[in-house]
Image (cartoon, rainbow, N blue to C red):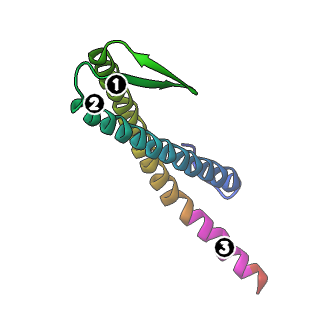
Amino acid sequence: MSEITPENVQEQVNIFRQMQQQVQNLSQQVSQMEMTIGETERTLEEIKGVDENATLYRAIGSVMKKIDDNSMLVEDLNEEKERMEIRNKSLKNQIEKMNIELAEMQTKLEPVLQSIQDNNDKTSK
């Protein structure tokens, strides 16, 4: 991150706000991913109690497809869940790193902004 000066403070504030927005977007993705993981876990739990010969269907878009091999469905769902958990962990790590960056930026921005405010207060008197 570049040095923050009174001359480039507006640019740095804009970068700070963009990063905050990115963190918010990533947090929404994490929430959606956690909901999807939860749905997949509930589906797997429901399938556990079903007879091996039971007829199961899987939604593919707006179409329901009959499943020929229930054990293959369980395997697919477990793989999907694992991929989602990895992606979710990655998103959380990104958020954590960005929050650290934001805290550092805020620490550097506050004194410059305060100095500008103090100068404005002096000139307006």
Q: Which mark sits nearer the N-terminus, 1 or 3?
A: 1
Residue 65, compared with residue 20, is above or below; it is above
Q: Which mark sits nearer the N-terminus, 1 or 2?
A: 2
Q: Which mark is residue 47?
A: 2
Which of pointers 2 and 3 indicates the residue nearer the eye? 2
Q: Residues within 10 Å of mark 3 (few under 14, many from 20)?
A: few
Q: Are marks 1 and 2 in contact (CB under 8 Å)?
A: yes
Q: In terms of depth relative to the viewer, which is nearer, 14 or 84?
A: 84
Which of pointers 1 and 2 indicates the residue nearer the eye? 2
Q: Residue at x 26, y 17 (%)?
A: 71
Q: On the rendered image, what quadrant is the C terminus found in?
A: bottom right
The residue at which mark 3 appears reads as 117
Q: Residues within 10 Å of mark 2 (few under 14, many from 20)?
A: some
Q: Amino acid at mark 1?
A: Leu
> Can the viewer see residue 60?
yes
Q: Residue at x 34, y 25 (%)?
A: 77
Q: Residue at x 67, y 59 (%)?
A: 6
Q: Which residues are magenta?
A: 111-122
